[in-house]
Amino acid sequence: MRQVALLRGINVGRNKRVSMALLRRLLADLGYADVVTYLQSGNAVFTSASGPASAAQAIEQALAGGLGVESKVVVRSHAELVAAVDGDPLKEVATDPSRHLVGFLSAAPDAEHRETLVDLVGPQPDPDQCRIIGNHLYLWCPDGVLRSSFAKVDWNKRLGVTTTMRNWNTVTKLVDLSREYVEAASRYPA
């Protein structure tokens, strides 16, 4: 199964430095195949027989044990990533992919935490917008993330689950990277 690992908070400033070559080697050592990384922010595409939850746990443990880096990891299958893109509730308004973000959540927030989101956004701020669909958080910040009403929100605390954000450019590139292997595998089955 083709999957995408999204590491939270690595290579931000001087903290939690992980080279992508080292990350590729770590994933290969876990038995994952066809490992590709994208950018320096902890995005890796790989093939594994284990499911996303097992892969996330294994990667977190390998980062901590092998590299001494504590980082939460969210993993999506190729199909889940495609569904997140296809289900984007803000596609009609989000015109700049660098200001349109997807938060990948470790689980769907419970009702209590979803209610705190309602409290946060109230009547939807204009022009910033936010929606949750299952285990994905979608943000549209037309004036930029740092100028948005969401700039200082601690999403992990607010939603009660691990959250790692990627902009739309990165998300669609990860879909493309994972799709290449899925399509090749279907043309040349083992």
Image (cartoon, rainbow, N blue to C red):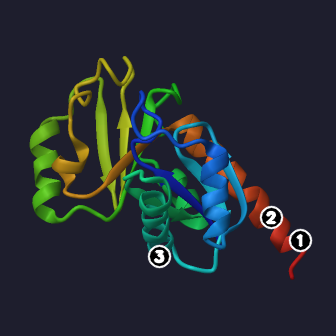
Residue to which mark 2 is pinned: 183
Residue pictured at 49% horizontal, 54% vertical:
67
Which disc number belongs to residue 141?
none
Q: Give me the C-alpha separation between circle 1 and circle 3.
A: 28 Å
Residue to which mark 1 is pinned: 187
Of 129 and 76, the residue lying toward us: 76
Tag nearer the camera, 3 or 2: 3
Could you tell me how many numbered marks the image carries? 3
Check if mark 1's residue and mark 2's residue have beta carbons within 8 Å. yes
Q: Residues within 10 Å of mark 2 (few under 14, many from 20)?
A: few
Q: Residues within 10 Å of mark 3 (few under 14, many from 20)?
A: few
Res. 9 image quadrant:
top left
Check if mark 3's residue and mark 2's residue have beta carbons within 8 Å. no
- The amino acid marked with disc number 2 is Glu
Residue pictured at 67% horizontal, 46% vertical:
21
Residue to which mark 3 is pinned: 54
Q: Position of residue 79 (x, y in %)?
A: 59, 66
- Compared to residue 13, the image places residue 16 above or below, namely below
* Residue 172 in sight from this viewpoint: yes
- The mark that comes first in sequence, 1 or 3, is 3
- The amino acid marked with disc number 3 is Ser
- Compared to residue 85, the image places residue 14 above or below, namely above
